Image (tube, rainbow, N blue to C red):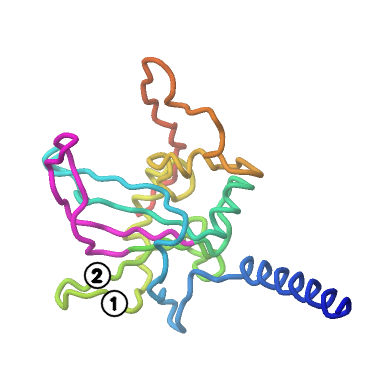
Amino acid sequence: MLTVTLYSCQDTKTKSGQSEQVKNETVYAEFDADNNLIRPINYRSWVFAGTATTPKSHDPKAVFPDFQNVYIDPVGYAYWKKHGTWKEGTILVKELLRSGDTISSVGNGFFQGAHFELAAAVKDSKRFPDMHEGWNYFGYADFKKNKLNENSPPLGNQCASCHVQHAIDGDVFYQYYPVILAAKGYGDGNPENENTREGLVPYYKYKSPVVSPKPVIK
């Protein structure tokens, strides 16, 4: 009985170690032979970075008036939190939603409606050496067929020209997502477990993070 018990404990420990190793080696961004990004799956279980919207009623010139929910793969987020830089292979998924209700029991505002578009950004310097810091961009909605495609070709500077110019640094618009901003280089532990909150002060007033000067991409 003792022998069986010892073996059982050792077996559990080994499986746990293998499980951790597999987790660390998980590849979330998968490509086909033509460098098309295969449509990400299960991303709603990743780290949720936040949401944003720029409704036309607020800004008639808004380029993307719909809601944008952003998710980061867990390995990429963990690396960002530890090092303050983006790991090769990191993928961010942006899921777009139509506007929904504008009236609720807590007051009038902007609420999410139906999902419709899916987009992604991947950092892969070896695969995309000509892209700024290796970031490339992808989109999946086929509005003629009213469905999402199974893969997407890289969109290149069609998206990068805006990201490089307006991201706080690098290519990610994390100045608009406090979850990413607070995690940058945090190290061990998690910032959400702190008992302090930047906004938990009298007369709080938002200050936008400074965006570094960027090269112009044409």
Going 43% across and 44% down the picture, which residue do you hit?
174
Q: Residue furthest right?
A: 3
Q: Which residues are magenta?
A: 91-118
Which residue in the rendered view is the most extreme toward the bottom? 33
Residue underneath mark 2: 141
Hey, what amino acid is under mark 1?
Asn
In the rendered structure, are the residues bearing label 2 and label 1 in contact, judged by CB atoms less than 8 Å apart?
A: yes
| Magenta-span inclusion, residue 3 | no
Which amino acid lies under the numbered mark 2 shown in the image of this protein?
Ala
User: Which residue is found at the position 66% from the left and 44% from the top?
Assistant: 188
Q: Based on the displayed image, in which of its 4 quarters is residue 26 positioned?
A: bottom right
* Residue 112 is one of the magenta-drawn residues: yes
Q: Circle 1 sits on which residue?
A: 149
Q: Is residue 94 left or right of residue 92?
A: left
Mark 1, other Cα within 10 Å: few <14 / some 14–19 / many ≥20:
some
Element under disc 1: loop
Question: Where does residue 103 sit, x and y in percent of width and height?
Answer: 12, 41
**Pointer 2 local density, CA inside 10 Å: few below 14, some 14–19, many at least 20:** some
Q: Measure how far apart labels 2 and 1 are at the Cα level.
A: 6 Å
Residue 178 percent coordinates (x, y): 43, 39
> In the picture shown, does residue 139 fall above or below 2?
above
Number of marks: 2
The first of marks 2 and 1 along the sequence is: 2
Instruction: Check the picture and name the quadrant holding the C terminus.
Output: bottom left
Along the horizontal axis of the image, is 8 left or right of 125?
A: right
Residue at the far top: name it: 202
Quarter the N terminus occupies: bottom right
Q: Position of residue 65 (x, y in %)?
A: 19, 49
Secondary structure beneath label 2: strand
* Quarter occupied by residue 193: top right
Q: Position of residue 190 (x, y in %)?
A: 58, 43
Mark number displayed over residue 85: none
